[in-house]
Amino acid sequence: MDAKDILGIPKTQLPTTQEKKSRPQKEPQRKPDGISREVYALTGGLAPLMPSIDVSQLKKRPPSDEKITWQWLPFTNSARKDNLQLYHWVRVVNGVPPTGDYSFAKYNKSVDVVKYTDEEYEKYLTDPMWTKEETDQLFELCERFDLRFIVIADRFPSSRTVEELKDRYYVSRAILIARAPSPTDVSGHPLVKDPYNVSQEVERKRALSMVLSQTKHQERKDAEVLAEAKRITDSRMASRAAEEPEMPVASHVGSESADRAVVLGDTVSPSSNIQLPSATVVPSTSIIADSASTLASLRMLRVYLRTYALEQMVQAASSSAGLRTIKRVEQALQELGVNLKPKVPTKAVCAEHLELRKEILTLLNLQKQLQYKEAEGSSYRDGSYIDMPGTPKRSQRAGDQDRTFVPESINFGGERVGKRDQKRKGPGRLSEAPSSPAHKRPRKKASDL
Amino acid sequence: MTNSSSSKKHGPGQPEEIGPTLKLQRIKMSKPEEAEKRNLNKKLKDVEISIPIVYGNVAFWLGKKASEYQSHKWTVYVRGATNEDLGVVIKRAVFQLHSSFNNPTRAVESPPFELSESGWGEFEIAITLYFHADVCDKPLNLYHHLKLYPEDESGSMSTKKPVVVESYDEIVFPEPSDSFLARVQNHPAVTLPRLPVGFTLPPPVPIEDTSKRKRGDTKDHPLAQWFMNFSEADELLQLAAARQQTDSALQRMIKVAENEIV
């Protein structure tokens, strides 16, 4: 300790050593009163994080002033109609048994089934399909089974569907209305508020069971068709709204429709109604429809920025492409030295930009398809993985050619690779050989032009 | 009668300079009088008006005079791309500044539509353009990120040379009303496609005596020397070259595909 003093080592060691000493001492002292020593040791000699039982309560609980006994006593249940007497344990305090009804009696709820008199039956309820006996039986079962119609249907002597039974039962609504002094009195009653519609119910259940029993395949097909339908109706709505003022001239719009897509051309005629076209036409025109509907919706805007319009058109054109494909299009654009967003977005520039994007998309799709064909072809053509030198297989040769169109990026012949960021005047990051001076165009700020 | 026959001639042969996507559609008119009436009452179809604009900011470092909270003096603005007067179309521009500024909503009622302030921070400014009644009843929003500090941090800030960031864009009115069209048909700030033959507009009615009005164009603006030039030629060339490359790549790929399918 003196040495430490001399060295000037802080004396933090001391308290911890003291702690360590005290803890083993404390442990045998610390066994709490409530739990036995052994149990406490089970928990590792430490207190639990949250004391589940208040330790002080453990031994003190029995209230000293009350004398509690437990007795086996009979009881009655007011919910029962038959005066059955059963026995159970009862907590008796100071010789006085508890008072009050059986505690679970209050849960015995039942439905108020309307009860009609014979008169009322004659007046309101006669029905060619139902005899009085059947109706009486039905109502009695309803009462007994608390309107659980599935059970009632099962128990009903003659076979009737659940819907029929419900329909018959809900005729009691008529009774209620008839009984009521004025219609408004009873209009709040649930039976009156929501009338039962048999045909609708039957239809609903049929549709539900159909949906539930559909196969996965069916489901997918349905979803596809619905999506297509939605797209078509949307585009038709958009173009229809745009075409609205044309309606009076509808008979003369031949030249107009010729320039638009097939889908739109159909909607121009005033007698068109929105119906699903045949499934074969739809997929091929979906991209054209997207672009056309984007155009139409832009028209409706009354004012917009050119850059916004371009964004929308680009989105529409790429709607069928996944994120990865879109990224590849952007990569290709960068490789070609084209700005992802034109710096001078005039009408002409935007149009060219859009066309370029569409072309690259076509290129990528074609490349993908080629690769698939490639994979298919080679998988059943190649028996072995051994290549004989000098006799390269056709598939391999084509594969090599394919490989010039590198899967991850398009190599446009390595001629001219622009620089990425036009603001930077630093060297471009090219892995290819530097292009000829004629092609090299360092991108400078537009202010230098 | 003459109208409809001439319309047929000029239908497909519309000027290409407007761009491949615009084809001026000829509405075949049954009777010329009816058509004219219709034109006067409705908006024109497929004749869009576009206003090329440039918006952005110029920022000067205050150098010795700079304090902690006022290190730069900047001006944010919306101007015609060729510095023409935008007041013909824009009635009012509202600049929404950062909430730390007093009265952060600044409205500019007449051209040149600009706002000068001093500060130290960069933030996004929302610019709302309100147009004249016969132009459009809906406002348009632009967003510009105020730039005070130069791009490369090692670059020294000078009081003489400002930091300039501008963006080019075009305001497009797809279906302009006739009165709007008539009013601006010869204005230099506005780009109109060539009107189809047979279309006659009433001669423009000047709104007010232009000589009395304060100059709205920015040609001789004090900051004009810093304005950037935006030319579409460069970009068009770039795009044309890119399309050529894509075309040839596509051709090559088609050849490969043809070889495959045997």
Image: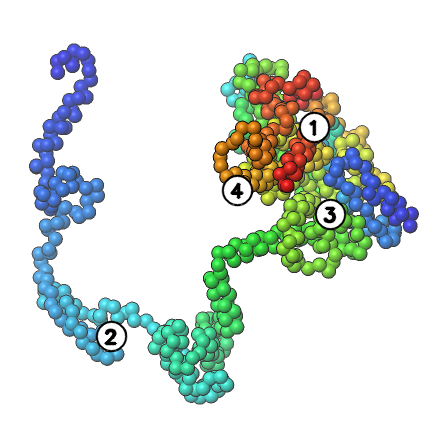
Classify mark 3: helix, strand or loop. loop
Residue at image position (44%, 88%) is: A119
Residue at image position (70%, 32%) is: A349
Identify the residue under disc 1: B241
Kind of residue at badge 1: Ala
Label 4–label 2 contact, CB within 8 A: no
Identify the residue under disc 3: A260
Query: Are discs 2 and 1 both within one chain?
Result: no
Classify mark 1: helix, strand or loop. helix
Q: Position of residue A96 (x, y in %)?
A: 12, 68
Identify the residue under disc 2: A78
Which chain contains the residue that carries disc 1? B
Identify the residue under disc 4: A380
Where does the N terminus of chain A fall, quadrant-wise? Answer: top left
Query: Which of the two discs, 4 and 1, sits closer to the camera?
Result: 4
Viewed as shown, does residue B64 lie left or right of A267? Answer: left
Viewed as shown, does residue A270 lie left or right of B165? Answer: right
Which chain contains the residue that carries disc 2? A
- Foreground: B166 or B13? B13
User: Marks 2 and 3, Cα distance to the nearest angstrom?
Assistant: 81 Å
